[in-house]
Image: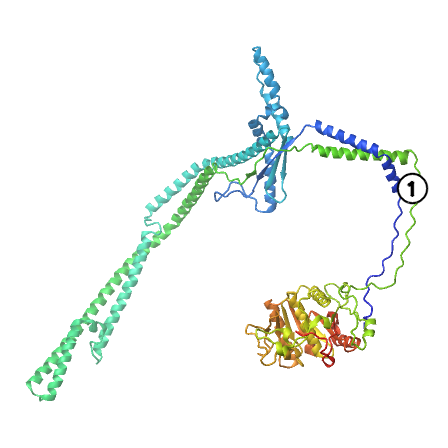
Amino acid sequence: MLDYNQPIDRAGPETQQQRPQAGFNVLELVNLLWRRKIAIAAAALLGATLAVAVGKSVTPRYTATAQLYVDPRELQLVDRELTPRAQDVSGMAMVVESQARLITSNSVLLQVIQQAGLDKDPEFGGGGDARSLMSSLLGLIGVRPPAPSAAEKKEVQLAALDALNRHITIRKTEKSFIVDIEVWSTDPAKAAMLANTLTSAYLAESRNSQASAARRATNDLSGRLKELRERLRAAETTLATYKAQNNFVGTQDALISDQQLSASNQRLSAARAATMDAQARLDQIEASRRTAADAGANSEALQSPTIANLRAQYADARKKYAEQAGELGPRHPALRQTEKQVEDLKRTINEEIDRFAQSAKNDLTRARDFEASLNRALEAQKRQSVQLSQAAVRLRELEREADASRDVYQSFLKRSRETQEQETLNTSAARVIGEATVPQRRSFPPAMSMFAMIGFVFGALAAASWFVAAEFLLAGATAPAAPTPARRERAQAPQASRAPEPPRAPEIAPPAQAPRAPEFAQALPEISAPSLQPEMDDNALIGKPLIARLQEADVIHTLGAILATGGGVDLTRLGWPTLRPGFPLTTLLNAWRDMRVTVSRRAGGKAMPVIALVGAGETIGRSVTALNFALAAARDGARVLMIDADYQAHPFSNKIGRPGKTEPSKLGWLSIGSKAAREIKTVNGISVLPAAESDAGKATDAIRKAIEQARAAGGYDLVILDGPVTPLDAGSRKLLDDADALVAVLPTSLDINDGLEEILNTLGRAERKLTGVVLDELTPATQARQRGRQYA
């Protein structure tokens, strides 16, 4: 078994290192400089004066800065550009670098020299003032000075170009398209004017280069248009002549012969269908006439109004004959007349049907003749189409040549018009984002205060160095003072480094009623609790579990049966001792805060850590401690879910589940297997899941499922398990494996060492999750005395 009386010491005692002895005597050096302080101060002032004089004699420079935004992704005003664009980052950076170099090109700088008249500025190598003065003097005596030659003008421009190059600095900001143009001059207004003139000249040069490129492309394309036009005209003339010679007449989509052939084929199909329809109609009429059935039972007869009238008369005559046959004898004249009338009507109907049959025969003959004529015309058109198909081979070849010539000519003509319009378009995305302003401060030399400071420091250092060299090197100073005696070494106590304990509970005093309190005070167990996730940091120190004392002074007793409220479940009105209100900085609360902080650190960033309170002996003490632990967390603003994991005794569930006292919340959505074990909302900011009425395995699975649902929903900050009860079974060990930390509850009314050893033996490998120990010093119920207690 581990020895819990001594903390774990992973770092050995540090060895005391001797301080190295100094190589020279600092005190003598300080004394030397102090004796020469007046001379050093005088040298420093002299140096400052000389530095200021030098700064005043230097010609000041003023630097003006203009900012350009050079975007390589130029404006896409037309579909096709003359110059390809950079697509990747390196290509864009090269484009910006090239544009930055273009700013200082000779063509741009010569425009600046011409616009600003720098060839006459003495600062840039010109002799404008002297030449003007000489011209004025010669003009007074009537002599005109000779005009400068072209070579002299060229030389002056080159000198000004070289001087302007030295006055310009181009800076490109890293990872951007911003280019800073810095121009310095002895005149601040001139510096700003030159910077702005340079940006304008660059933008003008960029536009001119684009227009020049478009103009060259237009000239090259226009030179080819005449030849392409003549080639297209010759191809179209040849195609038209061939069509006229071979009778290729038609619309743009198809030839007339093809259209006629298609139309004849459709008419022939329709004629064949009409012939088949006439044949079928005749066959139906003939079949009805041959059968003994009614000959008029066909569609033509039924649709004929004449036959319909005759059949109506026939029906009336038959009806009349039937009436007379019942009243008159067979030889009666009226009956004979009616019988003759019936026969005449029947014969008339048959004659009408014969006319229908003869009409169907005539229709069939006409349809057959029309089909034969269409068939002969189609055969003639087919022969003509075959002849045209043989001639169409050459026709298609001529059409392809004409189409190719037409496409090339149209593309050249369109591109020529596009490039001609691009001459007047400015597709460059470069623009001025910051014009140069007249600088208010000079860029060189620095301020006179800086010159004075530098001269003062260098003068003092020079004088001090001179005096030190004269004292130690030239005058043969005495040897360095002997090193100071070594400090007396401090004795190393061979005691192990103690693990950090909670500052609010440095010493645990035994309770007065505990029979073995002196033994506990002499040998208080210090439990090693390694990290809950050892794979993350195997070399981390294993800290001792934090210790808290739950005393009578920390709680107040309530009479739950008398003072129970009806406005909701109040966990401080259950009749158990609960934390005193209004004391947020007690030793117990601070110790429990440290435990929760340790659990959050060891939980590895989990949103809802799980803390299980386990104990030995009576379960009522563990449940009271778990309740107060949850109340302390809720008092600090945490959203707490408390689950009764004691499926055997479940004292906490029995306490809050008395008939008529509490009811499950209708808003609760968590449950652990039964309707009675549904979530209960309390007025203390704590949600309670009572114990489920089932065996150990089902209860454990239900609790684990409820924890997963609460963690997925994200409605709580902390889960506190009241239990599981010892000794542990398989289901209880699963709960301990899912828990992020364990807190042991030890009643001081029993032997603390034995109880702690029993808990450690029961936990097994879960001992590494032990974060804290709560010493329950509340008086047991069997020894309770009502005298001296406070009730609320």
Q: Residue furthest top?
A: 141
In the rendered structure, the answer to whether residue 476 lies left or right of residue 763 reads right
| Number of on-image labels | 1
Q: Is residue 349 above or below residue 253?
A: below
Which residue sits at x=60%, y=21%? 128
The correct choice, above or below, for 488 with respect to 565 in the image is above
Q: In x, y percent, where is residue 629?
A: 68, 70
Residue 65 found in image quarter: top right
Question: Relative to 706, does residue 59 appear above or below in the rendering?
Answer: above
* Residue hosting label 1: 480
Q: Image quarter for residue 43? A: top right
Circle 1 residues within 10 Å: few <14, some 14–19, many ≥20: few
Q: Residue furthest front?
A: 787
Q: Identity of the amino acid at label 1?
A: Pro
Give the SS element for disc 1.
Answer: loop
Q: Quadrant of the N terminus?
A: bottom right
Depth check: give the residue in front, 19 or 777. Answer: 777
- Left or right: 670 in relation to 218: right
Q: Nearer the viewer, residue 557 or 44?
A: 557
Tell me the residue at 76%/29% (across/down). Answer: 49
Would you say 524 lies left or right of 635 here?
right
Residue 143 seen in the figure: no
